[in-house]
């Protein structure tokens, strides 16, 4: 466990001796690099879950929640960038979320709270990325060899090996070219999936979609809060301070440009994937819309080459997402294990880096193999992780930093968001954990099918 900061946290000497800062969180990037990182952190294959989300909310509530979540998260990230800019101008540049929270709120407990939540998010996304990558490989394999002997956990092992190799890229900034490719990949597979859904919906064999919700009121409520938690996870970005840390100082104002780039991509991808998928499949939508387009015992509902290309794009982007969210774990490891007095690629620093990052990825791969709950993992991570970090804490940090008058509109908007999403987080945590427990009866350890 990382320790809370001691002494003069913001001095140049302190940062020079901090290997996590000096190596992993190097500050060399431009605003467009931050845009690439943000897009990879937010816009991923989880958008293929959006039709599944709509089946728990219906058309109008689904569109409303998707829109409101987008507005609130953009506002939240904007406020956090303002707080970071304010601290930098006052000579206290923060490069870690946990240190920002501890400094602004003046609490060592907040340091541990943030690092616990970030760890849960990072591990959850690491597991989810490897799980989805393994599932993507399995989908391609099952179409080439329908009765082949390989199981899901074997494809997860393959994806884990690739992640182990890629995880040796030493710095967050070194991912900038990978994350630019990631941006184009998400646009590519979204357009391919949307085209496939339109093709399936207009084909002669298309079934009329049923958009009805759960018949029992209690089940409908639980499904709605689970869906809201998934949307929170899809929009979530629990590493914004670490992404802003990659910007060459002064970072003031640069993050907003990166956010605008990211949300332009979000607008194009989120709505098109959600609407097209739910329009075709309704309440039969799978937690991965590709599974709906490629049913197990029926012909594919779109041209095979379109679906194959989409799966390849998804697979490639998953590696970028896993790398981005692993950076917090790596900077914690490096802060403890590396020596800034020796080079980044010195034997003294290289060997521990290889060993620790390999162990981390093996652990993520092992959990993904044992517990293939993609939709449920999304919901739990959203409720327990992203809602506190992205919808509550930024409002508190802004109010504590800028102290808006209690009569101001900003103060009331921030408090309304905090109260609303605290309640949604509590209900979402309960409903998503409930679904996880119920789904536990549907699978065996190292099962070969991902549970919705």
Image (tube, rainbow, N blue to C red):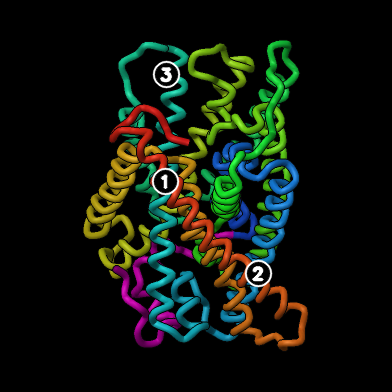
Marks 3 and 2 in Cβ contact (< 8 Å): no
CA distance for labels 3 and 2: 45 Å
**Residue 146 higher or lower than 84, as above or below:** above
Residue 222's x, y, as percent?
Answer: 55, 50
Q: Nearer the viewer, mark 3 or mark 2?
A: 2
- Mark earlier in primary sequence (3, 2): 3
The residue segment tinted magenta is 1-29
Q: Is residue 442 magenta?
A: no
Q: Residue 270 in the image: state x and y as whole percent.
A: 67, 43
Q: Residue at image x 58%, y 75%?
A: 84
Q: Is residue 352 toward the left or the right of residue 329 in the image?
A: left
Q: Which mark is residue 417?
A: 2
Q: Which residue is mark 1?
A: 436
Would residue 182 be seen by someone viewing this image from the given angle? yes
- Earlier sequence position, callout 2 versus callout 1: 2
Query: Does 20 appear in magenta?
Result: yes
Q: Nearer the viewer, residue 99 or 337?
A: 99
Is 287 above or below relative to 111? Answer: above
On screen, residue 245 above or below 156: below
Q: Quadrant of the N terminus?
A: bottom left
Q: Residue at x 66, y 23 (%)?
A: 196
Q: Nearer the viewer, residue 211 or 260?
A: 211
Q: Which residue is mark 3?
A: 141
Percent across and percent down for residue 226 are: 54, 50
């Amino acid at each position: 466990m990382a320790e809370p900061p001691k002494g003069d946290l913001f001095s140049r000497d302190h940062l020079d001796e901090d290997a996590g800062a000096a190596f992993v969180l190097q500050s060399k990037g431009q605003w467009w690099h931050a845009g690439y990182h943000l897009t990879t952190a937010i816009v991923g294959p989880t958008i293929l879950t959006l039709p599944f989300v709509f089946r728990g909310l219906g058309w109008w509530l689904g569109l409303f929640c998707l829109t409101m979540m987008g507005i609130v998260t953009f506002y939240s990230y904007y406020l956090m960038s303002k707080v970071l800019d304010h601290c930098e101008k006052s000579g206290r540049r923060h490069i870690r979320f946990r240190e920002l929270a501890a400094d602004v709120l003046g609490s060592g407990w907040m340091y541990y709270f943030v690092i616990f939540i970030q760890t849960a998010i990072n591990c959850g996304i690491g597991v989810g990325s490897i799980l989805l990558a393994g599932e993507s490989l399995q989908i391609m394999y099952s179409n080439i060899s329908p009765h082949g002997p390989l199981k899901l956990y074997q494809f997860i092992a393959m994806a884990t090996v690739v992640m182990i190799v890629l995880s040796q890229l030493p710095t967050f900034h070194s991912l900038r070219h990978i994350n630019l490719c990631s941006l184009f990949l998400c646009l590519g597979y979204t357009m391919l999936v949307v085209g496939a859904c339109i093709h399936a919906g207009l084909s002669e064999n298309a079934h009329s979609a049923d958009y009805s919700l759960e018949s029992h009121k209690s089940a409908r409520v639980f499904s709605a809060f689970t869906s809201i938690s998934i949307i929170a996870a899809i929009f979530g970005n629990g590493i914004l301070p670490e992404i802003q840390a990659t910007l060459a100082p002064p970072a003031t104002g640069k993050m907003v440009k990166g956010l605008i780039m990211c949300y332009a991509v979000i607008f194009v991808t989120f709505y098109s994937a959600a609407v097209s998928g739910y329009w075709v499949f309704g309440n039969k939508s799978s937690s991965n819309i590709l599974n709906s387009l490629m049913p197990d015992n029926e012909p594919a509902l779109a041209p095979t080459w379109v679906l194959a290309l989409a799966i390849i794009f998804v697979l490639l982007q998953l590696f970028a997402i896993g790398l981005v969210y692993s950076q917090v774990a790596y900077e914690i490891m490096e802060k403890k294990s590396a020596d800034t007095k020796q080079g980044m690629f010195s034997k003294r620093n290289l060997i521990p880096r290889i060993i620790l990052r390999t162990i981390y990825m093996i652990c993520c791969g092992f959990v993904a193999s044992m517990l293939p709950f993609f939709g449920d993992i999304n919901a739990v991570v959203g409720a327990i992780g992203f809602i506190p970090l992205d919808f509550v804490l930024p409002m508190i940090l802004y109010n504590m930093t800028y102290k808006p008058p209690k009569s101001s509109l900003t103060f009331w908007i921030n408090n309304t968001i905090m109260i609303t999403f605290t309640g949604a987080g509590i209900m979402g945590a309960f409903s998503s954990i409930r679904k996880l427990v119920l789904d536990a009866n549907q699978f065996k350890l190292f099962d070969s099918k991902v549970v919705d």
